[in-house]
Image: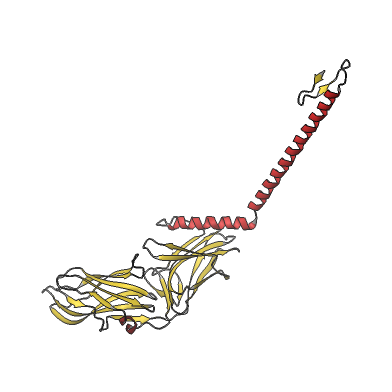
Amino acid sequence: MNYTEKYHLPQWVETDRVMMRDFNQMCRDIDAGLDRNAQAAAAAAGAAADAASTAGAAVTPSALNSALFRAAYNHYHLVDRMEPIPRQSGVLRLPFVEGAKTTVTGFLQEKDLLWAANGEELLTLEHLRVSFRSVQALTPTQRLMAATFTAPHPGLVTKLRTFGRTTNSTAGDPGDCTVRLINQTNIKQPVLEHEERTSFNFDKGNSYGGFALPVHFLLHTGQRYRLEVEMDNLNSKPDMAMEQAGSFFEVTGYQTASASVSCNCQTEEAGRGGLALVRYSYAGKAPTLKLSWGGSQISPHRIRTFTDEQGRTMREAEFRRNTTVQTSSTLKVSCTCPAGSDVSIYQLGAVLI
């Protein structure tokens, strides 16, 4: 008796007898082989179906758009860390600094941000007197003056007033100094919100009475502050303090319910869509931000919270446009401030996809 090469099935010759045992075993071997082939074929068909399903999902428009937006977001943050920004096509990074090419309505242009406030009341000196405390005075041996206070409503301080005397040398000492505004609302993580160089511009000789110090800093809704004035030197032998009973500040309150800023985005070619990012912070009630991009009105897709290099808590609103962006388009950020809030906007960015 001979046998087949692959499955060892019996092959009778003329002189062999057909034995029942050999015949039945051959049929069992054939049956087992057919079953194995059927199982393998079914497994292969299932794997092929799974692969086809996965491949089909990967190329759906929704999945493709999500991948493109994710790539655009990551690319923008990589570019944002570079200074100067390398040559790019279809990327806009616009910090809201003085001199930026923008059209502003309702916002107050500050040195490195746009600010809008809608106090429940217009901030006045009377509001600040309630909490104002003089912590430390200037003396002929102490060149740091400090006070603490809480701002119940938003406002802008343009002048600091003190009372006392100076004894200047013949050459005179102008009273150059550094002013710092420290937010102590979170006592465990105080934040230096503002620092500037300024001067009392003392007259030569001896002086007595009130002294005005020009300043420029913002007060945010419901925040507790420490104000410091550090003299460059004590040549004038100052003896003065910020008094609670006096007019220690010149302050302006604001009640602006809505504000907007717009700019032009010019690119070399149109895009199938685009991603825009707005960085901002607020005090009080949360503002509402919306974006108009080439006439399309867009609400935030996502809002993230993070802490910047200065320790400030900031938000990042992400906007997604899923329709064609032309080579020239206008981006307009609109902000609605609820009563009792103020908002600072730092940057607008966009990437075409």
The coloring applied to the image is secondary structure
Image quadrant in which the N terminus is located = top right
Q: Quadrant of residue 319?
A: bottom right
* Residue 344 appearing in the image: no
**Image location (x, y in percent) of residue 129:** 30, 82
**Image location (x, y in percent) of residue 247:** 27, 83
**Image location (x, y in percent) of residue 135:** 24, 74
Residue farthest along the front direction in this orientation: 21
Of 10 and 199, the residue lying toward us: 10
**Image location (x, y in percent) of residue 37:** 76, 35
86 sits left or right of 235 in the view:
right
250 sits left or right of 336 in the view:
left
Q: State whether residue 15 is above or below residue 99.
A: above
132 sits left or right of 318 in the view:
left
* Residue 135 appearing in the image: yes
Image quadrant in which the C terminus is located = bottom right
Of 267 and 160, the residue lying toward us: 160
Residue farthest along the top direction in this orientation: 15
Q: Quadrant of residue 347?
A: bottom left
Residue at (39, 78) in percent of width and height:
154
Q: State whether residue 68 is above or below residue 102.
A: above
Residue at (89, 16) in percent of width and height:
14
64 sits left or right of 125 in the view:
right
The number of discs equals 0
